[in-house]
Structure formats: structure tokens, C-alpha cells
Image (tube, rainbow, N blue to C red):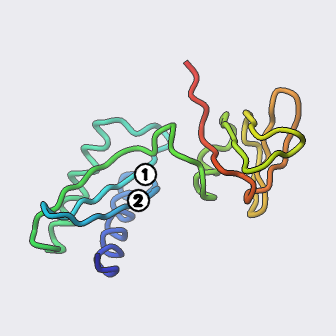
Amino acid sequence: MEHSIVKKLEELAEKTALEMDDELVELNCTKSDDGLHIEVIIYNAQGTSLDHCVEFSRAYDKKVEELNISDGTYFIEVASPGLDRPIKTDDDLRRNLGKKVEVKLYKKINSKKDFIGEILDYSKEEVVIRTDSSEEKIPREAISLMRQVIEF
């Protein structure tokens, strides 16, 4: 896929997100025999309902249509990040500050390879979480997976 088209699609998604008080989390484009598939992941602090995703999709589609990309066949899918989405970037960490997460490590730290706790802080080097028994500073390069804890 041509990098300039993806860049334009990303810019339009960012613009649409700003207009709708959303944050663009991720944009993925894949080309297949039936057309271009555009997946847009958005975050809204008040929550990202299905109705909001539909509203975003319609607003974004109007902008994409003007690009006249591909052979004109494209599909847009808009979704929220989802609770099971891995937390990887600084933006992901910022959005999850104060939330309970599970952290899995490549190798043990303090005799443990798995932690569950609330994200207190983060930097380029580490993530600080509060578990039931302690405050842990975990090097980011040691984290194999981090995601929100889903509690019912």
C-alpha cells in the first residue's frame, strides 16, 4: 500500500477525531481483492458507544470519499480500543493511568513474572504500578504484555 495514501487517511482520521472530541488510537489499512479495508480505532474519555462509532464512520467516510483512492471500493471499520487491547504506547499508558492492569514479564522481577495493579506513573524506561502488597517499578523492556483487567 502506498505510504502517501495511508498518511492522508491517517491525517483525515486525526482531523475527524479532533472534530468529534475523540483521540485517534490507531489506523490500519489493508488492500485485498475486494478493496481497501480501513480500520480506525478511536478513544473518547466519555466512552465510545456503537452509535458514536457509526457517527464517526459517516463523518470520516465523507472525507475519505474526496480522496478518490484505489478503484473507489473501500470499507471503513471504526471501533474503540477494547479492554483486551495491549497497552504499549505512552498514549495507551496515559489513557490507562489509575486503572487496574495485568502485567506479564519476559523474566521474573522480585521472584514474580505476573503482576496485577493500578498504573500510578510511567516514563520512557518504566511503569509504576500499585499491587495489593507493594508498589512496583517495572522496566518497560521487561514487559511482554500489559492490558486492562476485566472485572465483572
Q: Secondary structure at mark 2?
A: helix
Q: Considering only vertical position in the picture, is 116 above or below 103? A: above
Pointer 2: what residue? 18
Pointer 1: what residue? 22
Q: Is residue 5 toward the left or the right of residue 106 in the image?
A: left
Instruction: Tell me the quadrant of the picture where the N terminus can be found.
Output: bottom left
Q: Amino acid at mark 2?
A: Leu
Separation of marks 1 and 2 at Cα, in angstroms: 6 Å
- What residue is at 21 percent from the left and 66 percent from the top? 64
Q: Position of residue 18 (x, y in %)?
A: 41, 59
In terms of depth relative to the viewer, which is nearer, 142 or 122? Answer: 142
Q: Is residue 107 toward the left or the right of residue 104 in the image?
A: right
Q: Secondary structure at mark 1?
A: loop
- What residue is at 56 percent from the left and 28 percent from the top? 150
1 and 2 marks in contact (CB < 8 Å): yes
In which image quadrant can residue 5 be found?
bottom left
- What residue is at 30 percent from the left and 69 percent from the top? 9
- What residue is at 88 percent from the left and 34 percent from the top? 134
Q: Amino acid at mark 1?
A: Asp
Q: Is residue 75 toward the left or the right of residue 104 in the image?
A: left
